[in-house]
Amino acid sequence: MKNQIKIQETIKSFKKKINIPSDKSLSIRCVLISSIAVGKSKIFNLLNSEDVNNSLEVVKKLGVKIKKKDNFVEIYGLGINGFKFQNNAILSAGNSGTLARCILGLCSGTEKKFKLTGDTSLSKRDFSRVIKPLQMFGANIKSKKNFLPIEFTGSNLLRPIKYHENKGSAQVKTCIILSAINTQGITRIKSRKSRSHTELLLKHLKYPIKIKSGKNYDHIYVRGCNQFKSFDYKVPGDISSASFFIVLTLLSKNSELIIKNTNINPTRIGILKILRKMNAKIKIQNKKNYKGEFIGDIKIKSTKNFKSINCPQSLNSSAIDEFLLIFLVAAKSKGISKFRNLDELNKKESPRLNIAINFLKMIGIKVVRKNNDISIFGRPNLILKNNFHIKNFLKDHRIFMMSVIAALTLGGTWVINDKDSINTSFPTFLNLSKKLGAKIS
Ligand code: S3P
């Protein structure tokens, strides 16, 4: 089959320096926020992937002019409440939960009606988490049981809200902040800690947003309807994409890797904190501040003696997209690793917690599940010899890439379906793996 790959041998030792594609969360935020800035923004290193290209297509439909140049994209922002589009427009978010949730907040101030659609995976995801606060603002929303397609009509008479975001979801937080920007008055959000890119970018743009940081929660105050100027931005590498190569290096023999210019925002580096507690040899070099975000080079060395972890729940949100990889390391660790309260993992592009448990069992790892808590019984000497076929995972890009890392480090013969899934976040993933020496056909 054309859309399948085959891996029959583990990767040989490597020593390399690489760059990783740009951060997806920041790329989508740059597109959305520049579309409501006043004037022309230039975004350098915008990630070239389906989720980001869908974001560009959606803002184009809202009347925003986009010009793609050689190494940057020009986005001609229309200012707050400046979108111009036909009534009953159809906006397609493809596979992207971030785009779908955030675009609703961004459009909450326009009175035109539109329909939001998504692919099969996105159409299985629940939108009540954003429908509820948006209705409190005064938006009019029609859906079947909170799933896509959604019919949405905003209002130019939105009222500011007080909201308690308790899932640790940056998509929900961003949706509310963007809606608050369309609303006269001050919106107050108490938000469980989650990735902070939206707040940092708005602060950098001198937008009137205040953040009071607590241990587990942030209090965010947004004053609405304050026009702001266009901006230039150079998007750094994505720690979530880097993580596949971090774990590849850790689980390979005698290898070393430097991943340059990666976003290391403290709300994104749960994986580094968790893996270090498990003994992983990871260092950060050349740390610097870029427009409020931290960026650095990550140096990784193969590690032999992983120990199990009792993972603090407070790290869940900052490692949410990386748990599949953390579970692989747990499978090779001495002892029983414990992870708690992972219900959000089942609400991603696929039910990742369920799929991960079946995956671990398939490779001979004992897993005990109690509600949304799991214990993984590590086997440091695990070497696989069987044949494996990975299929039916709703084309979830992270399941595909995690399976490739397992195949390249644990042994066995693997056939993995739905190669195209990588296009949502990391189209060059297989080429980069091959550059490090992976044999993939
Ligand atoms: C994202 C937030 C996270 C993450 C997703 C990207 C973002 O989702 O899983 O891949 O860019 O805001 P939740 O906010 O639903 O946890």
Image: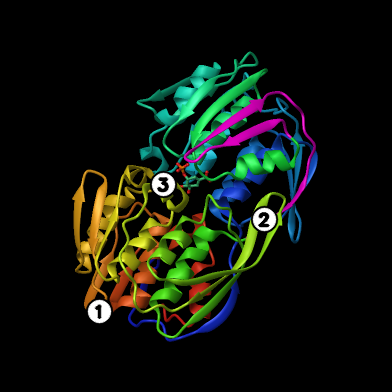
Find the magenta span and give its range.
207-236
Label 2 – label 3 distance at C-alpha? 27 Å
Toward which corner of the image does residue 330 lie, by quadrant? Answer: bottom left
Crowding at dot 2, Cα within 10 Å, few <14 / some 14-19 / many 20+, comes out as many
Q: Position of residue 293 (x, y in %)?
A: 65, 52
Query: What amino acid type is highlighted by mark number 3?
Result: Ser
350 over 207 or under it: above or below: below
Q: Is residue 21 magenta?
A: no
Disc number for residue 235 = 2
Residue at numbered disc 3: 314
Q: Residue furthest front?
A: 215
**Outermost residue toward the top?**
157
Disc nearest the viewer among 2 and 3: 3
| Nearer the observer, 35 or 298 | 298
Quadrant in which residue 391 is drawn: bottom left
**Residue under label 1:** 381
**In the image, is 155 to the left or to the right of 318?**
right
